[in-house]
Image (cartoon, helix red, strand yellow):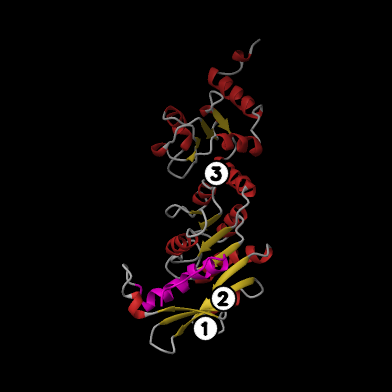
Amino acid sequence: MGLKAFLSEDEIINITFVIQIFMIKYPKIKELNEIFRKNPFISTDTRNIKKDSIFFALKGDKFDGNSFAKQALDKGAKYAVVSDPKCAPDTRYILVKDTLKTLQDLAYIHRRNLKIPIVAICGSNGKTTTKELIRSVLSQKYNVFSTHGNLNNHIGVPLSLLQINKKHQIAVVEIGANHIGETKKLCEIAEPVIGLITNNGEDHLAGFGGIKGVIKANNELYQFLRKNRGLVFVNQDDRLLSKLSKGINRFTYGQDKKADVSLVPSKLIPNIEILVGKNRIKFVESRISEIKEAITKQDIKDLLNDGAIIISDKKGIEISTNT
């Protein structure tokens, strides 16, 4: 007697499907990395598919990227990484257990193959502005990659890392979080060697359980750099950041004269002067007013808060003014 005598046609189909799942051989991340090296463009949205790219079918609470895999291939993607066996009819589909974890693992492997320093920026406010300021200054001397827009979460950081190529000499990566543990995870993927926390604010408390949770989450960057002997840039005027960063290789800045880089008033005229060790950088008011986009004293203070000038100096970029 055959199976049909005991089971319905639908039950036979379901059993066959389960058996096929157990027989699936998932590709290793190294194999996927080889595919990525030949097709170094990643997309998670069918609205911006590039020719010969790899589409990752991510799943969310209200969407399932597996449903768009065929559409991505029709639009020019070379491969589609999916997690649903029903959506993998041929070799153009790469079947994995978890598309998000695979994306993160691929980003980690790619980052390990990059021989460049990564600067990580995190904090409650000012991450994007700080990132752009640092990128602008560093790009005077280096080929710099920086996070596009605000791709700074558990999806955005891996996507950002996978955009870095061999031509880049340094990367500035923005790291955001909406719960404790996310910054730690993203640091483990990005492996920054330099870090800066802008501040610990109360603007985004959801998911953290209060300001103490925010502080704990941001501090995960310091903890990673402490463990891996990285370098942190710390606003010494922020007592909490100064306290949290103790014991880490750090470079301090601020209006405090004890900082490695301090903002002090000029003795001759009431203008701005930045003290870098024994060297002074003067910003003379009459000269500043001639700049196309006028720089004020507050702007210089903001630059110190953002740390852009300080990081560029540490990287060896000369900062000069005509006084």
Range shown magenta: 295-323
Residue behind mark 1: 256
Q: CA distance from mark 1 to mark 3?
A: 44 Å
The reply to whether residue 254 is visible in this rendering is yes
For numbered disc 2, what is the local secondary structure?
A: strand
Amino acid residing under circle 1 = Asp
Q: Is residue 25 left or right of residue 50?
A: right
Residue at far top of view: 1
Task: Report the mark closest to the observer, 2 or 3.
Answer: 2
Q: CA distance from mark 2 to mark 3?
A: 37 Å
Amino acid residing under circle 2 = Thr
Residue 100: which numbered mark, if any? 3
Residue at far front of view: 322
Check if mark 2's residue and mark 1's residue have beta carbons within 8 Å: yes
Q: CA distance from mark 2 to mark 1?
A: 9 Å
Q: Is residue 60 above or below residue 300?
A: above
Q: Is residue 214 left or right of residue 289?
A: right
**Mark 2 or 3 closer to N-term?**
3
Task: Report the mark closest to the observer, 1 or 3.
Answer: 1
For label 3, the crowd category at 10 Å Cα-Cα, with few meaning under 14, some 14 to 19 and many 20 or more, is many
Q: Is residue 133 above or below residue 150?
A: below
- Quadrant assignment for the C terminus: bottom left
For label 1, the crowd category at 10 Å Cα-Cα, with few meaning under 14, some 14 to 19 and many 20 or more, is some
Q: Is residue 36 left or right of residue 205?
A: right
Q: Position of residue 109 (x, y in %)?
A: 63, 45
For numbered disc 1, what is the local secondary structure?
A: loop
Q: Nearer the viewer, residue 168 or 175?
A: 168
Amino acid residing under circle 3 = Leu
Residue behind mark 2: 252
